[in-house]
Amino acid sequence: MKKATAILILFYLITFKLSAQMIVIGAEKIIHSSILSEDRTFYISTPEDYDANDNLAYPTLYVLDGDEYFWLAASAVRYLSNRGFMPQTIVIGIDNRRNRDRDLTPTKGQYSPNGGGAQNFMSFLTNELIPEIEKTYKTQPHKTIYGASLGGLFSMYALYNHPTVFDNYIAISPSLYHDNGILFEHALSYFEKPSFKNKFVYLSLADEVYSEMRINFRNTVDLFKSKASSKKIRWHYKYYNTETHESTKMVGLNDGLRFLHEFWFVPFYQRDRGADGLTEHYKKLNDIYGYKIEIPEQLVNRIAYNILREGKIEKALTLFKHNIEQYPNSPNTYDSLADYYERLKNYTEAKKYYNRAFNVAKKYNIDTKPYKESLKRIDERLKD
């Protein structure tokens, strides 16, 4: 009996191991930098339906210290975008392990004796990494940079000295005390320059040990309070009195993304208006964020089904058809309209759109099994 039990357990373990699948959130890449004279590692995560939508391009989020925070950022972006709180976004994590002090500081300092390489690192980003990303991937001209601690210092350095590279800046517990707060001089100079539209800045500070960190952060916040609105900078700041320098990096990332996209979520009164409400809302988003934003396929689908459950048949039909017009290469759009007709017991129309879903899936090498099953079901109902 014991031998039989052991064999059975071994069988289940082997079966489990064979059936397990890896959960992949991104890929590791290497780019050679002529500017830095070294190979640099970066990590990239694309939206789940990236390959299925050839006509879509995506904003980008560049994560400093990607060796630590890439997986955190990629997971947060996927969660928030899937629930309608922000756009689907390409996340790029930049590994800063080897020369962190050198890359992320504008000068040498008491705590960064090897510092002073921020200008070279920025040249690497603007002339090598970002062009490579934009050449290889489907990107929108809308970029966000996230950094914490020294990464937060670099994010603010980028804003003050290279304000055309990124559109949004998330700086979590930035090390603004670096070199006796020298970056404050950069900030004063920045606010004397012409305004740059569609800029967003999120600043936060944890319960930090060093008083110079708190003082320099407060000075920066006060400067933004007096200058940011006249320069048309949208910004927020927050003190996390119950967080540490380490724990704030996760909380600050989430809040930074939420504040950046505070207008993104479609209010329910607009959802109830169907296609007209969605079109109006996304026009507003285009104006706020400054780039062309398409109404997401999944959102339209979800709202259409909600409206259908409420008995608003014609409004739901308009949304399902709108999705097909916007996303003609997605089998899911045809499948949803077929499902709509099936619920109304119009099996002839249902079969027509299940056929289209099957053909589109086949054309783009997408699994056709669910559409075959739907066609089989519809054929049986047509016979009846």
Image (cartoon, rainbow, N blue to C red):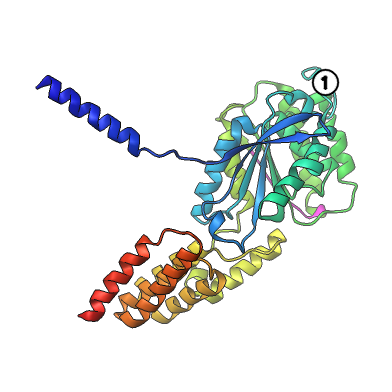
Position of residue 52 in the picture relative to residue 304 (left or right): right
Q: Amino acid at mark 1?
A: Gly
Asked whether residue 233 is drawn in magenta, I would say: yes
Dot 1 surroundings within 10 Å: few (below 14), some, or many (20 or more)? some
Relative to 141, is 226 above or below? above
Measuring from the top left, give residue 164's x and y in whole percent: 82, 49
Q: What residue range appears in magenta?
A: 231-238
Q: Quadrant of the N terminus?
A: top left
Query: Is residue 19 visible to us here?
Result: yes
Q: Which residue is mark 1?
A: 109
Please identify the dominant SS of the magenta region.
Answer: strand
Q: Quadrant of the C terminus?
A: bottom left
Measuring from the top left, give residue 217's x and y in whole percent: 73, 33
Residue found at x 85% / y 41%: 161
Residue found at x 60% / y 72%: 280
Relative depth, front residue between 383 and 295: 383
Relative depth, front residue between 240 and 23: 23
Relative to 189, is 321 above or below? below
Relative depth, front residue between 214 and 106: 106
Measuring from the top left, give residue 242's x and y in whole percent: 55, 30
Residue found at x 49% / y 74%: 274
Relative depth, front residue between 241 and 59: 59
Q: Quadrant of residue 370?
A: bottom left
Asked whether residue 178 is drawn in magenta, I would say: no
Position of residue 208 in the picture relative to residue 370 (left or right): right
